[in-house]
Structure formats: C-alpha cells, structure tokens
Image (cartoon, grey):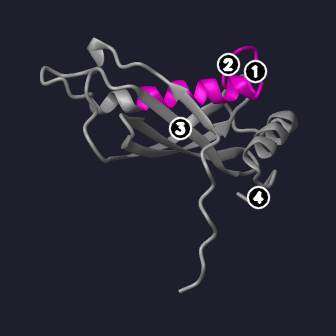
Amino acid sequence: MPDLPPPIPFRFESATPLRWVDVDSEGVVNNAVYLSLFEQARYEYFARLAALRAGNIAFVLAEAKTTFCRPGRLGMAVVTRARVRRLGRSSLEMDFESVGDGEILVRGSAILVWVDQDLRPMPIDATARRRIAAFEGIPEGSSE
C-alpha cells in the first residue's frame, strides 16, 4: 500500500454558539444547522484572508457533503474548522469539521466556484489565490 501524504491541518477555526432555534425538542442540533455553521466559517475564512469582493464571497456553492458523527446538543461550545484542500482554475475544494465538547460532530466538504457579477464561472482572482495558497501551504493552482 503506498504511503499517503499527511492530511492538511486545519489552520482556521470559527467559534459559533448554538442557539435555541438550532435544536429540536430533544435538544439535538438539527442537521441543516451544520451547513449554516460551515457557511459562517467559510465567510469568516475568506474575510480573514481579505478574499471578499465588496464584502461578499465571490464563490457560489456547487456541491456540499456532510457526514454526521455524533449528535450536537444545546449548550455545547462548538468550533467549526475550515481549510482549502485544492485550488483549481475557477473552483476550490474546502473541508470542514464542527467540534463540540472536544468531539467531532460532523465532517463536511464543499466545492465552490468563483463567479463574476452575473454568476458565471471565471478564474479565481490572483490575489485571493495567492492568499489562500500561502495561508494553507498548498500549490496556487492545479488543473480542473
């Protein structure tokens, strides 16, 4: 079996408290809330890297996947981790983990496409690409 490269570490975290509206009558976090946690972490990630366009994320979500590991509960201190795993010409792949009380609650991934003002795919802005690659320690580009 070939040696696999070590996983890219998460270098970004976003603490997001759970709200009463986020849980069901049993106090368990609703599954749809995790996509909102990923979205908030994604926004904060790009804001921290100054990779927003006029205050907005210049990417649209093309795909999202989640794997639920443990139920989250109201009152947990939840942190969502985010990282860019791959930069393509006009898209990138991100990974996410939401952790509550030290345990992984959910893992997820997303494919995002950089778009123009008419929401048509276009190459990722060179400055955003450099900042993301430098922050993550990954190559600036790969084929798509």
| Mark in front: 3 vs 4 | 3
Q: Earlier in the sequence, mark 4 or mark 1?
A: 1
Q: Mark 3 highlights which residue?
A: 81
Q: Earlier in the sequence, mark 1 or mark 3?
A: 1
Q: Earlier in the sequence, mark 3 or mark 2?
A: 2
Q: Mark 4 highlights which residue?
A: 142
- Label 1 with label 2: CB-CB less than 8 Å: yes
Does 38 appear in magenta?
yes
Span shown in magenta: 35-58
- Label 2 with label 4: CB-CB less than 8 Å: no
Q: Is residue 99 above or below residue 57?
A: below
| Amino acid type, label 1 | Arg
What is the crowding at mark 4: few (fewer than 14 residues within 10 Å), some, or many (at least 20)?
A: few
Q: Callout 2: helix, strand or loop?
A: loop
Q: Mark 1 highlights which residue?
A: 53
Alpha carbon separation for disc pair 2 and 4: 25 Å
Q: Callout 3: helix, strand or loop?
A: strand
| Amino acid type, label 3 | Arg
Q: Is residue 118 visible?
A: no
Compare residues 40 and 135 and report the one nearer the observer: 135
Compare residues 64 and 67 and report the one nearer the observer: 67
- For residue 56, the mark is 2
- In the rendered image, the residue lying farthest to the front is 102
